[in-house]
């Protein structure tokens, strides 16, 4: 549903399972291991046909579950101590199971212990690869908690890479959302402007401008353009074209100038994009679509 309650999309899932050989089915509701999308969903109804619900006590549920499953349930039930007790039963916990312990300790406010466990996980590349989806999900759900923990345990570069990956879709679709702005600015405030990659630099600049940090935004945009000229720092170009990325940065630089009431300076960023033999329709349409560049709309007249 939208903000006004209007139903925007509806999906019905019909599931017909095979007859269980064990005592019965168990319905487990959980999100994906990777959380980059910008959507929330609620389950309104489950219809059970050809089966009957059993009344299972919490004790019977716990007895049937593996320790990691019980730990996950305890975290959902806001019982981090119970989660830690369940994890203590594991002789050789996996990286994902150890990450559950990090979450439990963080919720208990045991920051040093959580950071120490996270640092131990980052000492092995294979373990990091195994928990990368979960780390991204944590950075989407609670960036104010796991951002500082990751920065302390693995260093700022590791945080920057995970954070920009985790929030990439939200940045493209909902860059003006307060959660997007807060998460990305808090994580990228210390990003290396001289040696950083293009995409995080662009994201840092866009977010800084929307938060009113104009000087930081301008510095980020200059650094982003410099990164585009370095093949090792340019990375994967978002729109498949360097020219489109340059145009996107120029629009942002022009917006900074407009906000500073420097219309001539803003026009100087846009004119080179239009004063060519065959102006790109994308550039013209993007200029006309941006209300924040209204003082520059006249540059595209007749094109």
Image: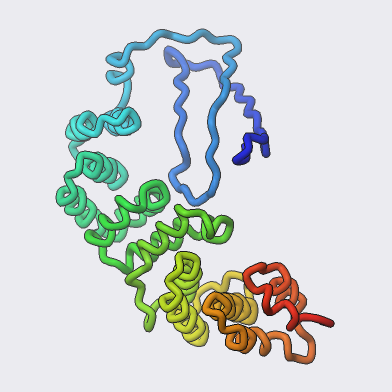
Colour scheme shown: rainbow
Left/right placement of residue 22 relative to residue 282 reads left
Q: Residue at x 48, y 86 (%)?
A: 226
Classify residue 132 by image quadrant.
Answer: bottom left
Is residue 80 found left or right of 143 in the rendered image? left
Occupied quadrant, residue 296: bottom right
**Extreme-right residue of the structure:** 302
The percent coordinates of residue 159 (x first, y second) are: 33, 62
Q: Quadrant of the N terminus?
A: top right
- Residue depicted at x 45% and y 75%: 214
Between 175 and 46, the residue placed more toward the observer is: 175
Q: Where is residue 48 shown, x and y percent of the image? A: 57, 14
Residue at point 51% right, 87% down? 229
Residue 209 x, y percent position in the rendering: 48, 70
Residue appearing at x 62%, y 70% in the figure: 292
Please tell me in which quadrant of the rendered image residue 253 appears. bottom right
> Who is closer to the viewer here, 34 or 9?
9
Asked if residue 75 can be seen in this view, the reply is yes
x, y percent for residue 70: 30, 28
Residue 40 sits above or below residue 280 on the image: above
Q: Is residue 214 above or below residue 136?
A: below
Q: Quadrant of the C terminus?
A: bottom right
Tag count in the figure?
A: 0
């Amino acid at each position: 549903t939208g903000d006004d309650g209007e139903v925007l999309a509806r999906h019905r899932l019909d599931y017909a399972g095979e007859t269980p050989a064990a005592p019965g089915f168990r319905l487990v509701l959980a999100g994906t291991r990777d959380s980059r999308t910008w959507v929330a969903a609620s389950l309104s109804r489950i219809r059970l046909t050809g089966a009957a619900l059993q009344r299972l006590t919490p004790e019977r549920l716990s007895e049937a579950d593996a320790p990691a499953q019980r730990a996950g349930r305890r975290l959902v039930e806001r019982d981090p101590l119970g989660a830690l007790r369940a994890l203590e039963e594991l002789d050789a916990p996996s990286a994902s199971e150890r990450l559950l312990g990090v979450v439990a300790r963080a919720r208990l406010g045991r920051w040093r212990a959580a950071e120490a466990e996270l640092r131990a996980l980052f000492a092995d590349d294979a373990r990091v690869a195994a928990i990368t989806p979960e780390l991204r999900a944590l950075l989407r759900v609670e960036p104010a908690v796991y951002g500082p923990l990751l920065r302390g345990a693995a260093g700022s570069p590791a945080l920057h890479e995970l954070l920009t990956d985790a929030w990439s879709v939200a940045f493209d679709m909902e860059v003006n959302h307060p959660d997007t702005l807060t998460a990305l600015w808090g994580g990228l405030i210390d990003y290396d402007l001289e040696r950083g990659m293009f995409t995080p630099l662009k994201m840092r600049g866009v977010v800084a401008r929307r938060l009113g940090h104009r000087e930081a935004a301008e510095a980020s945009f200059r650094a982003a353009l410099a990164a585009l000229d370095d093949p090792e720092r340019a990375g994967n170009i978002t729109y498949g074209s360097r020219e489109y990325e340059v145009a996107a940065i120029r629009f942002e630089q022009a917006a900074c100038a407009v906000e500073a009431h420097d219309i001539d300076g803003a026009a100087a960023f846009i004119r080179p994009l239009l004063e060519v033999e065959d102006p790109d329709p994308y550039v013209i349409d993007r200029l006309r679509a941006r209300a924040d560049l209204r003082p520059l709309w006249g540059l595209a007249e007749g094109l």
